[in-house]
Amino acid sequence: MNEIAIGIIAITVTIIIYSLILPIHKKVQSPLTLPIVAVSAIMILALLLFDIPYETYMIGGQWIEFLMGPAVVALALPLYRHYDMLKKYMKPIFAGVTIGAFVGVTTGLFMAKALGFERELILALLPKSITTPVAISIGETLEGPLSLTAVFVVIAGVSGAIISPVIFKLFKLERPIGRGIGMGSASHAIGTATSMDRDALEGSISSIAMILSAIIVSILAPLCALLFL
């Protein structure tokens, strides 16, 4: 079977599974039914069950990965729709994202050092809370292992999407602005997609928080690496 056929099959199966999971998640609001979680788990099990190498799946999966860029750009639409609201709250949004970026980078850095992580692992961990393309670019600058950087980014995004309802309930965080800042700062694109499902305004705030966080972390991560590693 040629690569094009394999790619088409991989994409088709992924889309079908996603299409089946999405209505289930809308009816059953649970972290376990989040499409990013459920679809990933099903695809991993399928690859293991049928003994399909990950590299074979990625022949088609890379086409889906390529669409991440346009998908992030498409988030500009809700930003435009809520421009007045974003302009009104720009100062608290910027302050919240700055604090979130600082906490995200420094806590990962110092906790990893306290646990005795090797330098390469810490370098991979620093840009964990920003969207994958930017995190990979920072990882290249830091000369850390890019594959681990990608793994940490996915973990940050998925864990944020899973535990965010519990965190919001625990701290009684009900306003979409606060929720959006938290999701965009900590869980990048995956968190933003989750926020968009909950509320359009929350998703818009999360979008701009994700963008601002990427800019701030791109400055902060190399600086922390230079000072503390």
Image: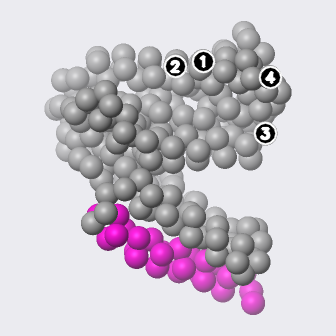
Mark 1 residue type:
Thr
Mark 4 or mark 2, earlier in chain: 2
Which residue in the structure is indicated by mark 2? 103
Q: For the residue carrying disc 2, how many other residues have a C-alpha within 10 Å: few (<14), some (14-19), or many (20+)?
A: some
Residue 7 magenta-highlighted? yes
**Where's residue 34, x and y in %?**
42, 58
Which residue in the structure is indicated by mark 3? 145
Question: For the magenta stretch, what is the residue range?
Answer: 1-26
Q: For the residue carrying disc 1, how many other residues have a C-alpha within 10 Å: few (<14), some (14-19), or many (20+)?
A: some
Label 4 sits on a secondary structure element that is loop
User: Is residue 194 positioned above or below 206 on the image?
Assistant: below
Q: Are marks 1 and 2 in contact (CB under 8 Å)?
A: yes
**Where's residue 149, x and y in %?**
69, 40
Mark 4 residue type:
Gly
List the single residue furthest toward the front.
170
Label 2 sits on a secondary structure element that is helix
Which residue in the structure is indicated by mark 1? 106
Image disc number at residue 116: 4
Mark 2 residue type:
Val
* Depth check, front residue: 179 or 48: 48
* Depth check, front residue: 188 or 218: 188
Mark 4 or mark 3, earlier in chain: 4
Using residue 138 as the reference point, say whether residue 195 is left or right of it. Answer: left
